[in-house]
Image (tube, grey):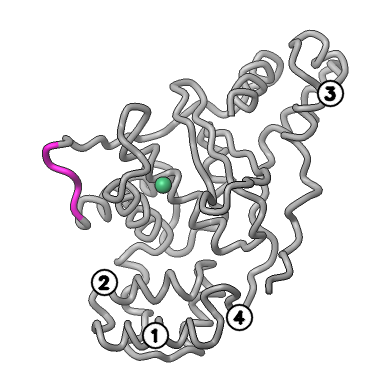
Amino acid sequence: MHLARELTLELDKHVALPDLDLPRVIFDEERPPDSADIEQTAAHVRHHWGVARGPVQNVVRLLEANGIVVVRFRVSIEKVDAFCVDFPDRPVVALGSDKGLRDRSRFDAAHELGHLVLHGATGPTGEKATERQAHEFAAAFLMPADDIKSELPDSLDWPAFMRLKTKWHVSLAALLVRAKTLGVMNEHTYAQGWKTLSARGWRRVEPGPLGNPEAPVLLQRALELMDTTGVSFAEFINRSGLPESDVRILLSRDFGERPRVEF
Ligand SMILES: [Zn+2]
């Protein structure tokens, strides 16, 4: 994470990278945000960044366009999908490349954005409450209530859920949860829905894969642009003193692009 930040700061000396524009909405620890607060905060961030109504086209691109560094690498810890470090100049979001699922990866990115917006550098993370808040933020950011509520079915209409998955680029599981939290689906139907997901093995591998996960482009493009100004990669490495092999690993995009075979 430190290397990603250092690399970005060094690149910024050669080419103009997007300024950091991260709206932060920190709540008092005495009065943690409720679901309505989080819904509003997610809407605020979307508005601030000029995201049109409906599905977010590309979450990773949106983060990068607003100065947040995104890297993707193998996270060898089973239970960790993604994490972030809130450096004040260049926050870095790391997405695991292990799963190779576009819907899950988008949700992970939005979850980390939730931490940056709601909890910042000093806030507690990894706790049950903050994890839940980041999850709620991700759901609200990717599926704003005003835009999706009328589209969600109140029954287990799987073809309808599949169509929504394709449109919104979120998982069936995320849609099911959203249908319940927005009060469209009742508890009983929701519980039945989870049973179906489990019974069909959809909690591990959902039908309707959406293709490759979104790929970060900021650092790679910055390097290419720098090259056109006459500063080669080798020269850049030389001047910056950054470890070349680690930088190459960080920039490598040739792994994790394919979905993994699951058993
Ligand atoms: Zn988290």
Question: In the picture shown, does residue 46 fall above or below 15?
Answer: below
Helix, strand or loop at label 1? It is helix
| Main SS, magenta residues | loop
| Pointer 3 or 2: first along the chain | 2
Does the beta carbon at disc 4 come under 8 Å from ligand 1? no
Whole-angstrom CA distance, mark 4 to mark 3, is 42 Å
Can you give x and y, in whole percent of width and height, for residue 234 in the image? Answer: 87, 18
Q: CA distance from mark 2 to mark 1?
A: 16 Å
Residue 193 tag number: 1
Residue for badge 3: 227
Pair 1/3: label in front: 1
Q: Residue at x 73, y 53 (%)?
A: 256
* Amino acid marked by disc 3: Asp
The 10 Å Cα crowd at callout 4, few under 14, some 14 to 19, many 20 or more, is some
**In this view, the mark in front (4 or 2):** 4
Question: Residue under circle 4?
Answer: 207
Tags 3 and 2 touching, CB below 8 Å: no
Q: How many marks?
A: 4
Callout 2 amino acid: Leu
In the shown orientation, is residue 130 left or right of residue 85?
left
* In this picture, residue 162 sits left or right of residue 115: right
Magenta region, residue range: 30-34
Q: Earlier in the sequence, mark 4 or mark 2?
A: 2
Label 3 C-beta lies within 8 Å of the nearest ligand 1 atom: no
Identify residue for label 2. 182
Of 214 and 19, which appears nearest the observer?
Answer: 214
